[in-house]
Image (cartoon, rainbow, N blue to C red):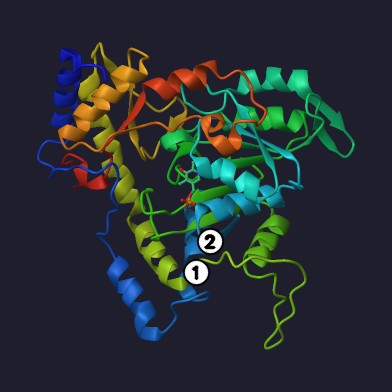
Amino acid sequence: MTDVAPWMTRLVDTLDGVVAGAKKPVALHEPWFGGNEGAYVKECVDTGWVSSVGKFVDRMERDLCAFTGAAHAVVVANGTAALQLAYQLAGVKHGDEILMPALTFVATANAASHAGGVPHFLESEEGSMGVDVDALDAHLKRVADVQVDGTYNRQTGRRMGCVVTMHVFGHMMQVERLAEVCARYRLPLVEDAAEALGSRRNGKHAGTTGLLSALSFNGNKVVTTGGGGAILTNDPVLGKRAKHLTTTARVPHPWDYFHDEVGYNYRMPNLNAAMGCAQLEALPGMLERKARLAAAYASALRGNPDASFVAPPPESQSNHWLNAIRLARPSMEERDALLGLLHQRGLMCRPIWKLMHRLPMYAACPRMELTVAERLEGTIINVPSSVMLAPAGPTA
Ligand SMILES: *Cc1c(COP(=O)(O)O)cnc(C)c1O
């Protein structure tokens, strides 16, 4: 292992200074329960409405539409299930390729496998860390063959079912430009907006540009329901089908059990939705505090020669889910020595994900040149980002 260099100690001191006063160890991201979470969950227990239907499920779907501007929201068991259904509803058939960034959390790719698809990994851009739209356009010009029954990959012979984009750490990539490219190649666009609840680009909320999108309410996300997710869409037919398929495809009837296709039990229990409704009430305040913490990191790192703060791209308003720093020197050995030092100091930092094609089950998948994605993989580190760490502000 590489020795600890003086610059590493200085950087750890700088980061430690931002969260000074926090109890060690400082987790990467902890949930914040300062509102009606307990009261709403207790109401479910008191009334017996804990399971697959209830007023909080309906309310959470309405609240998500109101907050994001999406026409339809369907809450489900987790973000991975939301993604799988989004791919299927976008028209992915067994054996289709699903184009997605190589730099993502494994769920984006796992959901593709669950939907019967084959991931096809795309290059990232330095700024937003999301899909590089120009590189994808050039790639599609080479490999895409648009036919009446779909767009095919000339190199593999497989149909391409959809393109998936992901807004890394809540920083929104150029989704409107990506939508144009997808339309040109007749590929439906799905947004993995699991990390981006509360993020907007030119005023438009994450997950409302693509045909469908997925949110996650896992315990480490901005809003948590313990475990949970949602499908968003502006298409009324797909919105209705998402609800139908995630609730066993049962045809509504006072007593009859008639199911008209193979459905899923992907429902979010009312108990979890109760927590979600309380979290959504608190979301604007949480976003404000997360923005203050991000500003504190940005200011502490200004002019630092060894690492820079990863700022949200222009035209976008990030939810600052996970703050990230970019190391000046791309060296895995130095990165790991620094992570060791951060952990010793009680700062539970972690590197960005390994690229998907490095995982055994995705090693043989088709992929673009991943030069930028590889550089990001070796230089990006997440730093503690919980709402509670925010410095006091005007409304704290
Ligand atoms: C969290 C996350 C998911 C999956 O969410 P779960 O609710 O944990 O299934 C999917 N994609 C990305 C990018 C995520 O960060």
| Residues under numbered marks 2 and 1 in contact, where contact means CB atoms less than 8 Å apart | yes
Residue beneath the point at 47% across and 26% down: 128
- Front-most of 254 and 341? 341
Residue 213 appearing in the image: yes
Q: How many residues crowd around disc 2 within 10 Å: few (fewer than 14), some, or many (20 or more)? A: many
Residue 175 coordinates in the image, percent (x, y): 58, 32
Residue beneath the point at 55% across and 67% down: 267
- Front-most of 158 and 131? 158
User: Is 334 situated above or below 216?
Assistant: above
What element does badge 2 sit on? strand
Residue type at mark 1 is Val
Q: In this image, 135 relative to 93: left or right?
A: left
- Front-most of 37 and 325? 325
Q: Residue furthest bottom?
A: 255
User: Which quadrant of the figure contains the N terminus?
Assistant: top left
What element does badge 1 sit on? helix
Q: Residue furthest right?
A: 148
Q: Circle 1 is placed at which residue position? A: 57
Residue type at mark 2 is Val
Q: In this image, 203 relative to 146: left or right?
A: left
User: Is 341 situated above or below 6?
Assistant: below
Q: Circle 2 is placed at which residue position? A: 75
Q: In this image, 152 relative to 24: left or right?
A: right
Task: Report if the beta carbon of the residue with label 1 is closer than 8 angstroms to ligand 1.
Answer: no
* Disc sitting over residue 383 in the figure: none
